[in-house]
Amino acid sequence: MTRKAMRNICCVAPAPTINPPPLTLTPRQSLESAAIYGVIESAADIIERWNTETSMFARVTSMFYENKSEAMLFIERVKDLQNTMDLLVSDDPNSERLMRAHKLMQIAMKRLQKEFYQILSMNRAYLDPESVSTRSSLTSARSSYSDFPDDDDSNNGGDCIVEVEEVSTNVMTDLKSIAESMIACGYSKECLSLYKSIRKSIIDEGVYRLEVEKTSTAKVKKMSWEVMELKIRNWHKAVNVSMETLFKGEKILCDHVFESSNTIRESCFSEISRDGALLLFGFPEIIATKTSKKNSPPEKIFRLLDMYSAIAGNWQAIESIFSFDSSSVVRSQALKSLISLGEAIRSLLGDFESRIQKDSSKVVVPVGGVHPLTISAMSHLTLLADYSNVLVDILAGSPPPDRSLIPESYFNVSESDDSPSSELTIRFAWIILVLLCKIDHKSQHYKDCSVQYLFLTNNLQHVVSRARSSNLKQLLGDDWVTRHLAKIKQFADSYKRIAWGPVIMSLTENRTVEMTVEEVKERFEKFSDGFENAYDKQSVCVVTDPHLRDEIKVSIARKLVPIYREFYNTRSAVILAGAGGGDGAINLRSVVRFTPEDIENYLSDLFLVKGISGNLSVSSPSPCRPRQSTS
């Protein structure tokens, strides 16, 4: 009751004492009646002023925009009016005052509904989910700008941030005031219908702008991989934006506007967000259930892993934003997509292992070089290792490889260690073992045993090199790397022994034993034939890793060149002495086809390769021909 009304009631003159009229109301009832009248008329004053049916100004003007203080007074008078109506209903439901109050309430609600619509539609920029979700960030940014008082640009930026934040806060406060008033007056249906209609269109438009479209399994089956991959990439961006801004911001706004009722804000947000969220989280399930596995490109698994990582990484936000029981369908859909993606990823991993085992490609490989299967398989595995954090979850509970099939010395994992990380280590180690066994089988295609060992050396070197330079090293461990480096050396030593051992052995001799001219000639002839034969075979071979190539060549040269140089220096004199006269030099050139320098030059030309891995071309080897000795 206003002070003016109270003052009028208190100053009423007393009735005459002679022949008083019969009293129909007690003093208390008279006071209450006057107070009710005052409340209704006070409310009528401001409500009629903003009646859209009787005032052109009220029809074209926003009360909250034009006169904020009067808008808040309007809300207060509506509240008083509602309290008065509650009192009248209990005392006299058919009173004229109640009818008048009811008509005023209808006018007031129509006004507030108009204001609610105007605020929602005219302030979309300030009620944008991104703006709402980052209000706390704006506050932090404003604080940071205050640290630079002398910077004009910083001040301008800070002023802009403050303005945006203030407008957004004021708009949300106005919406909350109107919503609480309408709900308290029994007009929640009208308020919610308007709010849901406008805000749902914003969410649906936001999802559409993020290029998430409704699709079906039938459509996905007909898609080319290029189109599907583009849609997956768009979805991946969309899910992060949706969880960080779109749905998060909408829930913050909804929670603020309908703070007075948990039931209303729950149902409101659920209805607004359900369709967009189901469309967003239903897409991965459709992609995961696409059949045509045989035609699926190898990189498909990485797109599925990206999708799995996106959902798993946002799972806490999903549970927080869609925490209501009415939003459980969204959580269920996200979980179904996770499960479907996990099943598809496990299936593709099995297909990957199977493709290695069944590989029967007959591609042309540079002699002894790295096989394309090794290159593609290790590229695949190193990328998979980047997803080890989610693969641990995906593979948890799935049957691991039989440890009894893996040599104990293959890698250092305790038999009792059954943690998820160790299971993942075993799986990666197993796939690499399958690859190495396949490479061992492919080495049999070379008839020359030395080339077989060089082929094994090159391929294992590639495997270890890729493992050491990727996350595979963390999975497999240093012990695995050390063991396989030793295996590379073992293969390389076997190659050198088989390919160049006979050449070196042809020079082995007892230096104290005297040799005839014929014996020296025979020994030079045997060495030259052996070296030519070995060089002709090995000159077409390649070693793709520069460090390994130099290491093998240097090792061969260190064993062969010094022995040959010593033999050349000590035994060539026998030929010269046996020839006599001036024909010694000519006779030496006819017997000794290679000088020590020739041997060094030929060895330096070994294993040269042009091009890049996967498309290697062997440089044309120069024929092993005797060079003229200058003696």
Image (cartoon, rainbow, N blue to C red):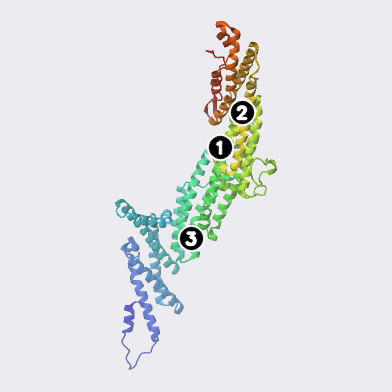
Foreground tag (3 vs 1): 1
Residue farthest toward the right in the current orientation of the protein: 404
Residue that lies at the very extreme toward the bottom in this rendered image: 18
Instruction: Give the secondary structure at mark 2.
Output: helix
Q: Crowdedness of circle 3 by 10 Å Cα count: few (<14), some, many (20+)? A: many
Q: Can you tell which quarter of the image residue 117 is in?
A: bottom left
**In the depicted view, which residue is nearer to us: 582 or 134?**
582
- Which label lies toward us, 2 or 3? 2
Determine if residue 590 is in view.
Answer: no
Residue named by callout 1:
466
Of callouts 2 and 1, which one flags the residue occurring earlier in the amino acid sequence? Answer: 2
Residue 454 - label: 2
> Where does residue 45 sit, x and y in percent of width and height?
33, 71
Left or right: 631, with 415 as reference point = left
Distance, label 2 to label 1, CA atoms, is: 18 Å
- Whole-angstrom CA distance, mark 2 to mark 3, is 70 Å
Residue ID for mark 3: 268
